[in-house]
Image (tube, rainbow, N blue to C red):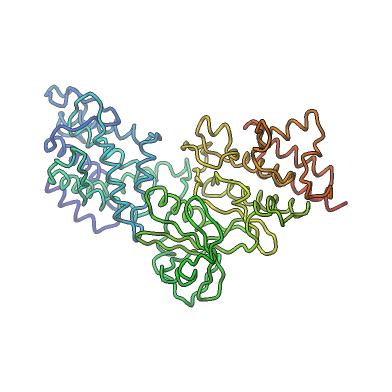
């Protein structure tokens, strides 16, 4: 074992593609055997590995894999390891997703310790999760490495992140006073560390083999990085100008200077993740600053979602993320400032009103933003919180979607991703509430509700009547037996095209209808533009 490790170390100075794949497999295999003889009985592996009776037998029932495995007893263990690894490689359940969520912040400046603690805790929970049965330590260890292989293979080209995962899981011992795992000797973690370093070479070798064999069959999506080292590795200079081509890391000092120490006079709004302040950077650029208090996982999750979704995405109808700041106790997101507030203020404000043409233009702008998100080349981005307060209005009344704190990114080819129900009451797709499937049709439903509010000027739920009713039910009822023009906002003063109004009502109801009958955002944009064309011909 020591001789093979020595050989491996000599190869580690070379690029991964030059390491012989056979040697890598041998090292991974021997690492697993090392755990067989050195670890005490552990908990049940979530993969439910069935230990072969031939592990302790000398009957050589398992194959030797063409002489690759010289010891017949090792063949059974190797068979079980391959079986476990295969099952985990195709596993898409919540266990791996949860681990990916807890580990995705590793390598992020300023919160690495907290991210490592979260990642290590989740990985140990997977290894040590148990039921009423007893199993050997090697089963739990094989399970852990199979999970780790599947997790890191998704981002194997992100060397900084993979290195951070190995360093975290290999060098740290999680302390938990309420967990019996605290009693484990540190020597087990030292052995784990050795296995992880060896596994790093194994992952690289396996990746090369898979890439060559699958090159002509599929095109793998490049993972979206949470933080791009090239963009975020240095803090901004006070004289630097922020543009929409990059998202800079801004110091806390400059954030507080821009907002006059978060002065109450600069407060412009309150979101689910924190307060929003108006600010002016030292270069004179006016910005909106979201202040996120680091009070646990939810706040960090919101911050990461926003940076991930917006830092690499640019579109005229999406609010541009210009910079961010990560500190121990708080985080900041810096956006372009939209001087005319949000759509909700214009629809429901007493002293504000929007003419018909302007409402159609705002609808088209918002729809184009969603269309862009749903067809993003690296995977569909589902906003999950489309509503009037998240549609901001610029000085020239251009609409921009904002607040990506709940957004989800779907891989290319995925029809949905599973998630807990998140969103705002009245705008959440009923089918999403039932099956927890996140996809673009949920955004289409929410947009349909916004369309109904745009033409009616009504709240999403009518709480003033004796029998509260949702907006889409009211509109649907009027189309079946009433006068649909009764649905129009009185502030419009009947200054609109009746034909265009009917087009918008039908479009909104199709968006809020059954999932299979909902239009795509491309079609929504087309029908809105038709309504605008009719309206401008009056």
Place of residue 129 in the rendered image (x, y in percent of width and height, measured from the top left): 26, 33
Camera sees residue 163: no
Camera sees residue 520: yes
Residue at screen point 25% across, 53% down: 167
Identify whether 273 is placed above or below 259.
Answer: above
Q: Nearer the viewer, residue 12 or 274?
A: 274
Identify whether 451 is placed above or below 81.
Answer: below
Place of residue 176 in the rendered image (x, y in percent of width and height, measured from the top left): 22, 44
Residue sitting farthest toward the bottom: 239
Residue sitting farthest toward the right: 538
How many numbered dots are placed on residues in this image? 0
| Position of residue 496 in the picture relative to residue 132 (left or right) | right
| Position of residue 414 in the picture relative to residue 504 (left or right) | left
Identify whether 197 is placed above or below 422.
Answer: below
Quarter of the image for the N terminus: give it: top left
Q: Nearer the viewer, residue 399 or 19?
A: 399
Place of residue 27 in the rendered image (x, y in percent of width and height, measured from the top left): 20, 44
Place of residue 268 in the rendered image (x, y in percent of width and height, measured from the top left): 56, 61
Residue at screen point 50% across, 40% down: 422
| Position of residue 166 in the picture relative to residue 521 (left or right) | left
| Position of residue 319 in the picture relative to residue 250 (left or right) | right
């Amino acid at each position: 074992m020591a001789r093979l490790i020595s050989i491996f170390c000599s190869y580690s100075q070379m690029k991964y593609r030059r390491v012989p794949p056979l040697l890598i497999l041998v090292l991974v295999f021997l690492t697993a055997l090392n755990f067989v003889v050195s670890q005490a009985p552990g908990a049940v592996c979530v993969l439910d590995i069935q230990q072969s009776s031939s592990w302790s037998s000398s009957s050589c029932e398992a194959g030797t894999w063409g002489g690759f495995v010289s010891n017949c007893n090792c063949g059974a263990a190797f068979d079980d390891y391959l079986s476990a690894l295969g099952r985990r490689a195709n596993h898409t359940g919540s266990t791996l997703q949860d681990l990916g969520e807890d580990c995705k912040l590793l390598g992020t400046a300023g919160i690495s310790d907290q991210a490592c603690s979260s990642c290590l805790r989740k990985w140990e929970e997977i290894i040590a999760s148990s039921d009423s049965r007893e199993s050997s330590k090697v089963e739990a260890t094989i399970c852990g490495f199979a999970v780790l292989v599947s997790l890191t293979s998704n981002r194997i080209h992100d060397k900084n992140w993979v290195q951070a995962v190995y360093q975290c899981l290999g060098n740290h011992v999680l302390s938990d006073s309420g967990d019996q795992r605290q009693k484990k000797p540190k020597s087990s973690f030292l052995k784990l560390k050795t296995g992880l370093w060896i596994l790093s070479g194994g992952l690289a070798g396996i990746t090369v083999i898979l890439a060559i064999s699958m090159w002509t069959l599929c095109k793998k999506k490049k993972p979206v990085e949470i933080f791009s080292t090239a963009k975020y590795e240095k803090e901004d200079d006070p004289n630097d100008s922020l543009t929409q081509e990059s998202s800079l890391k801004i110091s806390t000092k400059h954030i507080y200077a821009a907002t006059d120490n978060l002065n109450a006079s600069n407060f412009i709004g309150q979101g689910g993740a924190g307060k929003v302040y108006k600010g002016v950077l030292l270069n004179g650029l006016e910005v909106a600053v979201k202040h996120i208090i680091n009070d646990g996982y939810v706040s960090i999750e919101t911050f990461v979602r926003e940076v991930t979704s917006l830092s690499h995405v640019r579109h005229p109808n999406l609010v541009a993320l210009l910079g961010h700041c990560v500190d121990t106790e708080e985080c900041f997101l810096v956006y372009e400032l939209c001087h005319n507030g949000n759509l909700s203020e214009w629809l429901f404000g007493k002293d504000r009103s929007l003419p018909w043409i302007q409402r159609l233009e705002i609808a088209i702008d918002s729809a184009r933003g969603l269309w862009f998100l749903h067809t993003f080349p690296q995977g569909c981005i589902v906003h999950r919180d489309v509503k009037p307060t998240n549609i901001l209005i610029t000085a020239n009344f251009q609409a921009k979607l904002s607040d990506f704190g709940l957004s989800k990114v779907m891989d290319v080819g995925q029809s949905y991703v599973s998630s807990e129900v998140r969103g705002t009451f009245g705008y959440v797709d009923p089918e999403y509430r039932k099956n927890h499937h996140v996809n673009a049709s949920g955004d289409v439903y929410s947009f349909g509700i916004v369309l109904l509010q745009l033409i009616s000027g009504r709240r999403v739920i009518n709480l003033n009547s004796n029998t509260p009713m949702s907006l889409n039910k009211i509109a649907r009822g009027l189309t079946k037996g009433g006068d649909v023009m009764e649905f129009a906002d009185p502030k419009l003063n009947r200054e609109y095209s009746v034909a265009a109004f009917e087009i918008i009502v039908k479009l909104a109801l199709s968006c809020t209808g059954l999932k299979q009958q909902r239009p795509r955002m491309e079609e929504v944009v087309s029908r809105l533009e038709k309504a605008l064309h009719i309206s401008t011909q009056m």
